[in-house]
Amino acid sequence: MEVKKEEIIIRPPVVVVLGHVDSGKTSILDYIKKTRVAEKELGGITQHVGAYQIAEGDKKITFIDTPGHEAFSAMRSRGAKVADIAILVVDTTQGVQAQTKEAIFHAKAADLPIIVALNKVDRPEAEVEKIKRELAKEEILVESLGGKIPSIETSARTGKGIKELLELISLIAEMEDLKVDLSASAQGVIVESYLDSQRGPIAILILSQGTLKAGETIGTPSSVGKIKSLEDFQKNPIREALPAQPVRVAGFEEVPKVGENFKAFANLEEAKNNLKISEKKEPPKVLEIKEGQRVLNIILKTDVLGTIEAIEEVLKELPQEKVILKILKSEAGQISESDIKLAKGGRAIVLGFRVKTSPVAQRLAGRERIKIMNFEVIYDLVEGVRKFMEKIMAPEQVRTELGKMKVLVIFLSEK
């Protein structure tokens, strides 16, 4: 069937904001949105991917704010894959950091046009030209040094360069082919997902083509469902989702995996047949334990699925010569009674990241003396696990030779 001309539209650009921790990414977005989103993040760090849409004149721009901490490399990589343009935020008081280099890698791997935001230029210790030279060493040659990559000096505190940044995004978007077909079958990417204790599995997704409405069936390789509700990024109910619009969807049968592509289907049966959703589980990995080593079994519960892989990556970096970490279970959602029962059987501790513990689970943990450790910031979680590892570490026996003794004669004593 021939596509009608009025069904072809120019969708908003999707812009991913990349950079080192505390480079000012969220603060720049906060200034743009004129809301206090930045202050809501504990520890001043974006814990998981946030997607927002703003109006720029008569047009719209979708922003994806990705975490800057090195633990969230996988999540940042996902953010880059769904975007059209990358903004590389660099702190001019700190320079190019390890996560800055990683962000450059992700942007280049996704073949995205890059805009460099030289941030915090309002501070007296800012060294703009030095940072430009550091970027050049990473093959990011800005226009002022003879390259082709645009750069803008910005300050989230004063608003310097923000208007120019938005204008540049719009200009680059016009040069990109952002035409989409609204009549096509809906498809896109799962940006984030989690289990809501009252509403069930929730997914935050961005459409690449088509439209979505409540009642329609969508599926990913790991889950399918009929859409119960649609919300925009501010959790306002909407009747229809359009391309490049961040949408919160309820209705999946299981929590879909982050980073997966989704498609629309006529019904659940068609979705399951086409996606071939597998119920087979991977065989458990055999853990090799050396003599003298101890094992710390962990049950990990987080607010969203994307955070699980981030925490697992961080825990892998902890020294495990004497105490090995073994994750028995990891999933999104509150700490439940079944988690405590599993912890009892597996002699494990329970780690909660930005989740609540059900009253039943709390009482059972108290009776069974199961250790529950809840955290709001990833740095605290790592430190908590490190201290617990030191606590259970077997004391090392050291033999110190104080001297030598030689037996010369043995005398027999009469009774």
Image (cartoon, helix red, strand yellow):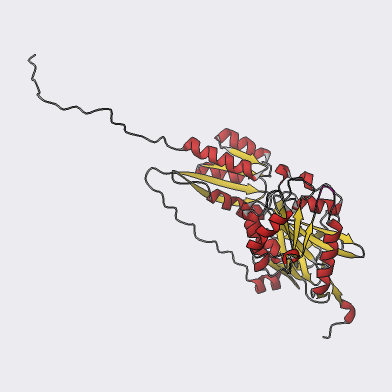
**Looking at the image, which residue sits at the far top?**
415
Residue 160 magenta-highlighted: no
Please identify the quarter of the rendering in which residue 18 is found: bottom right
The quadrant where residue 235 appears: bottom right
Farthest bottom residue?
2
Q: Is residue 226 visible?
A: no
Q: Position of residue 188 (x, y in %)?
A: 74, 68
Principal secondary structure, stretch drawn in magenta: loop
In which quadrant will I find the C terminus?
top left
**299 or 27, nearer to the observer:** 27
Q: Residue at x 72, y 60 (%)?
A: 191
Q: Viewer-proximal residue, 410 or 70?
A: 70
Across and down, in percent, residue 19 comes to 70, 55
Whether residue 157 appears in magenta in the rendering, the answer is: yes
Q: Position of residue 182 (x, y in %)?
A: 83, 74
222 left or right of 233 in image? left
Q: Residue at x 51, y 45 (%)?
A: 297
Question: Is residue 104 shown to the viewer in this render?
Answer: yes
Along the viewing direction, whichever of 14 and 369 lies nearer the viewer: 14
**In the rendered view of the protein, which quadrant contains the N terminus?**
bottom right
Residue at the (84%, 72%) spot, across then down: 174
Q: Which portion, as a residue range, is magenta?
A: 155-159
Q: Residue at x 63, y 47 (%)?
A: 301
How many marks overall?
0
Residue 90: horizontal and vertical position, in percent? 71, 55
Residue 199 lies, with reference to residue 83, above or below; the image says above
Q: Nearer the viewer, residue 402 or 346?
A: 402
